[in-house]
Structure formats: C-alpha cells, structure tokens
C-alpha cells in the first residue's frame, strides 16, 4: 500500500512534537540530536508545559501551541510526532491524517484495537503514513538474534521473562492492566519479530501481587499459539524488586536444531546441534526511538514501507487485548475474535463518514491488515 512521500528538495524533515510530558521530552532530545530532521514546534494542551520543554532542550522561543495540526500548519511542518498519552492517540493522529500530515506515533497505536483500525482506515483514505514507534524492535542485538534464530530451523517454543519494579506515578499507576497494555506490548511485538509469524490465540492469567503499588493487575503469564505451530510464553511483573531482568526481557528460543539465549542487554548466544551457528552482521536502523525516527524519515523520503506502519503494528495491540480478554474470561481467545469484534466496534463508533466507508469496504480486519 502506497503513501505520499516528501519532495526531493526537502533537506531536513520538519517536525512538530505533540505532547510535552516525559515521553514527549525523550522525543525532543532525540529529534534535536538527529541531523536529518528539524524540530519546528511543540504542542501541548498546557502551552506553558510546551514552553518549559522548549527551554529544557535549549530552544526557548520555539513555536508552541495547544493544537498540533494548527502548529504544524503555522510552522510548515512535514510531519507530527504524537507523544501524547494513549487515550489521546486517536484524536491527535486522526486530526493530523485528515489534515494531510504524516504521523509517527508512540505505542500503542491507539487506546483500543477498534480505534487503531479507525486510524488505519484514515491512513488509507488520506494516503498519508501513520507509523507506530514500537521502539524496542530497534536493537542491534535483537536483529542479530533473529538472524541467528533463522539458522536453527523451525521454532518450537519462544519464552521471555520480564521482571521489573518501576515506580512511575501518573497514569500507569491507575491503569487496569498496566503491565500488559503499557509494557508487554513490547515483548509481544518482539516475539512477532523474532518468529517472523503472527499470533493465532492466547490463554492468559493476569493478577496483582498483594504488595503491588499499582491499582490494576501488574503481573501476568500469557501463552500464545503462532502461525506454524510455535508457542510464545510471556511471564512478567512490574512489581518484582530484586534480580530484575533487562527492560527487553530475558529470552529463550527452542528450535529444531538448537537453542538461542538472549538476556536482553548483551549479544545472544546459540547452542546448535549438527550445524554451525551462522555468522551474523546485521544491525537495526538505529537504537530505540532514534531508530524509529530514522526509519520514519526514510519511509517519507523513499516510500518504502516501514515495519511500524499501523497496518503491520495493530496485531501487537490485538495480542494485548486478546490476553486481557482471556484473563477476564478464563478461556482461550483467538486473535480473529478480537479483530472481528474491534472492526464492528469501530464501524459503530466512527463519526467520520469517509473513514467509516473505508472500513466498511474491508472483507475483514485481518484482510485489511495484510493488504
């Protein structure tokens, strides 16, 4: 599926960041460090917060405002980086796409799969790129691990342990499913990347340890079946002090001809049987959100589809919703169940007639995502 690219004479891609909270400020520092882009404005509903963020990065006087689209038009921005809280992703991104402005958005694509499908339809309608920054894919060690895994033949079981104890404060402490929705989506997405396959179903148990400082469930175990028969098991907690894992998690892949181990912070290792471990020289486009930014800019210049395009990313969010539904109901949930219900919900909720018409023309949500 094609999207509009930038004119050849654009030397630096002009960006407006929407959202000046902690994540927005991480994006601001990343953008000012990248010579291929130019920060031209910061938008936040609290304009004073945007002004303070501009001063923090040494850019007092940078244009600011409460409306990202208005600011992008005022400054001649080529694209918007949406670093708002998840609940704001749908309105902010939809407004930008409808204004003809490409968007690089923080994960998740939206607060729900239904809203993410609406944004995918808006991207199709407008011919503008909406890419989700699933930033933990952008890791040289992960790219190398995937290449090594390919040399081990058919995958059997992929597992990851994730144990951390962050005290964030703010919206995460009040979320119903903080670990699954705000963190596990990274490991779910990384599993899709490592296996080169998509999920079929999940059985999940979600709970909250007695000592947890989160209002919602901060621990979970989820077992996914993937296309081709491989299994992926996630076990994690956001309230587990002591002997903490990497923020990437601690991984093990058991495959046809051996096992791959990756602790999340150092190069992976392979114990192969009957074959020599492949020599790997592969690197991500960049590290973390800097890698997301670099691939987004390259996509705008070349038209080459980035791996974070919204259509390709939605299944990672659907894995989260499927796991949450499984935990609530105590049964195995299929991804198609989530996709079909989400498309029905999106059609019922959509207020933009043209966006609704795009979704109504899809044979199914899965077909639309694979187009």
Image (cartoon, grey):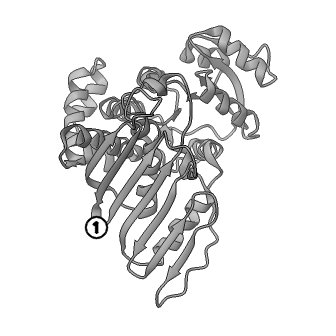
Residue 124 visible within the image = yes
The residue drawn where x is 59% and y is 47% is 295
Query: Looking at the picture, how far across and down is residue 314, in whole percent?
Result: 37, 42
- For the residue pair 327 and 342, the one nearer the viewer reads as 327
Residue 253: image quadrant is: bottom left
Q: Nearer the viewer, residue 361 or 272?
A: 272
Q: Quick one: SS at disc 1?
A: helix
Q: Is residue 268 left or right of residue 128?
A: right
Q: Residue at x 38, y 29 (%)?
A: 216
Residue 148 sits above or below residue 333 on the image: below
Drawn side of residue 63 relative to residue 359, left or right:
right
Furthest residue in direction bottom, as rendered = 274
State the image quarter where residue 224 is shown.
Answer: bottom left
Q: Do we see residue 2 in this rendering?
A: no
Categorize mark 1 by other alpha carbons within 10 Å: few (<14), some (14-19), many (20+): some
Residue that extends furthest to the front in the rendered view of this protein: 210
Where is residue 172 drawn, in percent x and y? 48, 28
Task: Tell me residue 142's x, y (percent).
Answer: 56, 60
Q: Relative to 295, does residue 111 appear above or below in the rendering?
A: above
Q: Considering depth in this image, is 368 or 276 the residue closer to the camera?
A: 276
Q: Position of residue 247 (x, y in %)?
A: 56, 48
The residue that disc 1 covers is 228
């Amino acid at each position: 599926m094609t999207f509009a690219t930038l004119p050849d004479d654009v030397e630096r891609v002009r960006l407006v960041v929407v959202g000046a909270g902690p994540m927005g400020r991480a994006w601001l520092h990343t953008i000012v460090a990248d010579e291929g882009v130019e920060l031209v404005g910061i938008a936040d509903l609290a304009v004073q917060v945007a002004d303070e963020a501009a001063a923090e990065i040494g850019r007092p006087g940078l244009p600011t405002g409460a409306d990202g689209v208005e600011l992008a038009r005022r400054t001649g921005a080529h694209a918007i980086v949406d670093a708002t809280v998840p609940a704001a992703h749908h309105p902010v991104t939809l407004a930008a796409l409808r204004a003809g402005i490409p968007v690089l958005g923080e994960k998740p694509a939206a607060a729900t799969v239904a809203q993410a499908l609406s944004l995918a339809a808006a991207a199709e309608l407008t011919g503008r790129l909406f890419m989700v920054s699933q930033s933990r894919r952008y890791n040289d060690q992960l790219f190398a691990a995937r290449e090594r895994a390919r040399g081990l033949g058919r995958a059997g079981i992929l597992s990851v342990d994730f144990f951390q104890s962050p005290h964030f404060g703010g919206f995460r402490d009040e979320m119903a499913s903080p670990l699954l929705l705000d963190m596990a989506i990274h490991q779910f997405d990384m599993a899709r990347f490592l296996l080169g396959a998509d999920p079929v179903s999940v059985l999940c148990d979600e709970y909250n340890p007695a000592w947890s400082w989160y209002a919602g469930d901060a621990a979970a175990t989820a077992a996914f079946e993937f296309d081709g028969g491989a299994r992926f098991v996630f076990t994690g907690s956001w309230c587990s002090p002591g002997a903490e894992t990497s923020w990437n998690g601690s991984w093990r892949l058991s495959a046809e001809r051996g096992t791959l181990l990756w602790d999340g912070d150092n190069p992976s290792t392979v114990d192969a049987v009957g074959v020599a471990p492949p020599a790997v020289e592969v690197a991500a486009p960049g590290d973390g959100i800097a890698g997301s930014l670099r691939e987004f800019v390259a996509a705008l210049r070349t038209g080459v589809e980035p791996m974070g395009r919204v259509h390709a990313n939605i299944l990672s969010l659907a894995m989260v919703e499927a796991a949450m539904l499984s935990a609530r109901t105590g049964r195995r949930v299929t991804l198609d169940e989530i996709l079909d219900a989400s498309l029905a919900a999106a059609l019922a909720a959509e207020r933009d007639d043209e966006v609704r018409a795009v979704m109504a023309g899809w044979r199914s949500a899965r077909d639309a995502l694979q187009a």
